[in-house]
Image (tube, rainbow, N blue to C red):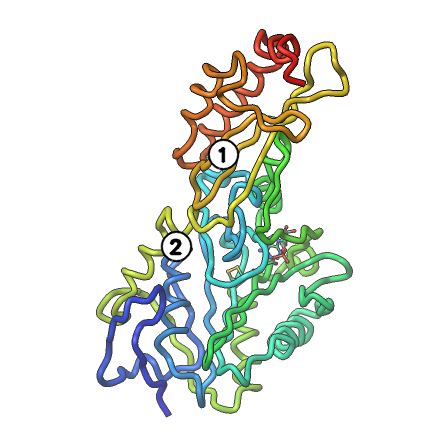
Amino acid sequence: MRLAIKSVKAFRTGYRCYSSVPETFSKSIYVSKETDIFTNLALEDWFYSNLDFTNEEVLMLWQNKPCVVIGRHQNPWIECNFAMLPYIAGGTKLARRNSGGGTVYHDLGNLNLTFFTNRKAYNRKRNLELISRSLKSSFKINSEITPREDLCIGNMKISGTASKLGRNSAYHHCTLLVNTNKNDLSLALKNSLEECVDIKTNASRSVKSPIINLKEENKDIQVKEVMAALIQDYKKTTKTFKDFKIIEDINEQLFPGITYIRNQYCSVAWIYEKTPKFQLWKNIPLLDDEYSVVKLSLSVDNGKVTNVELNIKDRTLSESDIGLKDFYLLINNLVGKPFSQELLDEFELVASGLKNSQLCRDIVHNNVL
Ligand SMILES: Nc1ncnc2c1ncn2[C@@H]1O[C@H](COP(=O)(O)OC(=O)CCCC[C@@H]2CCSS2)[C@@H](O)[C@H]1O
C-alpha cells in the first residue's frame, strides 16, 4: 500500500499538495543525496507532515556538510562557539531542529537516521538495537545502549538521539559517528559565552560526553558501507518493507511546499529568536572594597536585548542615582538590539570600562552602598 499524502503542517502553512500519490512515495527507505542541513531538515519535516504512517514505516538516511544542530529549546550562544563557526571546517552552519534534546556536530563523516512511524509503533530502543546489531554483524563492533539512549562503545558515545511526537505520527532521529573530524567537533561545541559571563536560563542544556568514531574501531569502515549494512538489516526486520530510493533532487515539483519549510529553518526568527529568554551578567569589584561588587546585567528575550542594568547588593541603580545618567545613556543604547558577538563585545567593553573607573569611585563616594 502506498503512503497517503496529507497537507503540509510544518510551520502551519496549510499548504495542500498532491491529489494523487506519485510512485516516489511508496518506498521504505529514502537516502538523501542533499548535504545542506536546512534542506535535509525541511525534507525530514516534509515527510513527517505529509506521509501517512498508519500502516507503513519509513527510514531516512542523510548527511550534512559541517554544521552544528541545536535542539528546539536550546540557546545557540551557550551551546556552540558561535563566533568561530565561520572558521571551522571551512565554514560551519548553525541550525535549530524541530526535536528537543542537546547539540551535536555533523560533517560528512557522520550519518543521520530518521525512523518515521505512527505514534503507537514509535520505539527508540528497537531502532537503536537495529543499529547496534548491524554494527556487530557487519563490522564486529560491540556497542551498547545507555539508559539515556546514547549508543556507546565502552563509555564513548557514537550516537545521540532525539525525537518528535505528534498526535498520529512520530519520528526518532539519531546520529552515527563514522569518521567525523573530532577536532572540529570539539571546537564547534565549545561554549565561548560561559567563559566570559555568568548566565541564567531555562533553555535545555546538552550533556557532554566523550565520543569515538566507528573508524577508530574498524579502520576500513566507511559511511557508505554502514548505510548498506543498515539498509539490509532494516529490510530484514521491517515487515512492510518496499525497496529504497535515492533522492537526487529536492524540488517543489516533488515536494510541494518544501521551499517554504526550508526558508523557515534558515530564518533568524527560528534559529535565534526562538531562544528561551536568558540573562547574563558580569560582576565588577568596587574600588577599595573587596566585599562589594557591581553587577552589570543584560536580559535577552526573543533574541533581542530587553534590559541592561547595574545592581549593587540586590539594589538596582537607576538613572536618577547621582552620576549614573550618562552611564545609563550608554547602556540603554544596547536595548532593542539583536544579541550577537558584536553586542557581547560592546557589553564587555562597557563592563571593563566600569572597572577602576571614576564612576565606581563616584558610586562609593556618593554613598550609594
Ligand atoms: N554527531 C554526534 N554524534 C554523537 N555524539 C555527538 C555528536 N556531536 C556531538 N556529540 C556529543 O554529544 C553531546 C550532546 O549530547 P546530548 O545528549 O545533549 O544531545 C544529543 O545527543 C542530541 C542528538 C540529536 C540527534 C539529531 C539527529 C538528526 S539531527 S540531530 C555533545 O556535547 C558531544 O559530546
Quadrant for the N terminus in the image: bottom left
Res 342 quadrant in image:
top left
What is the secondary structure assignment of the residue under circle 1?
loop
Tell me how far mark 1 sits from mark 2, CA to CA.
21 Å
Q: Residue 259 carries which label?
A: none
Image spot of residue 128 (x, y percent): 63, 73
Residue 286: give x, y in percent of width and height: 68, 15
Q: Quadrant of the C terminus?
A: top right
Q: Which residue is drawn at 62% across and 60% down?
A: 220
Residue 38 lies, in percent from the top left, at 38, 56
Figure check: 100 above or below 164 = above
Reading the chain from its start, which is encountered first: label 1 or label 2?
2
Position of 246 compared to 227: left or right?
A: left
Q: Can you see residue 307?
A: yes
Horizontal side of residue 73 vs 39, given as left or right: right
- Note whether residue 178 is visible: no
- Between 357 and 62, the one nearer to me in the picture: 357
The reply, left or right, for residue 105 in relation to residue 250 is: right
Quarter of the displayed picture in which ligand 1 can be seen: bottom right
Q: Which amino acid does label 2 sit on?
A: Asp
**Cβ–Cβ under 8 Å for marks 1 and 2:** no
Disc 1 residue type (three-letter): Ala
Which numbered disc covers residue 36? 2
- Count of marks placed on residues: 2
| Front residue of this view, candidates 21 and 230 | 21
Q: Residues within 10 Å of mark 2 (few under 14, many from 20)?
A: some
Q: Quick check: 356 above or below 332?
A: above
Ligand 1 within 8 Å, label 1 CB: no
The residue that label 1 is drawn on is: 83
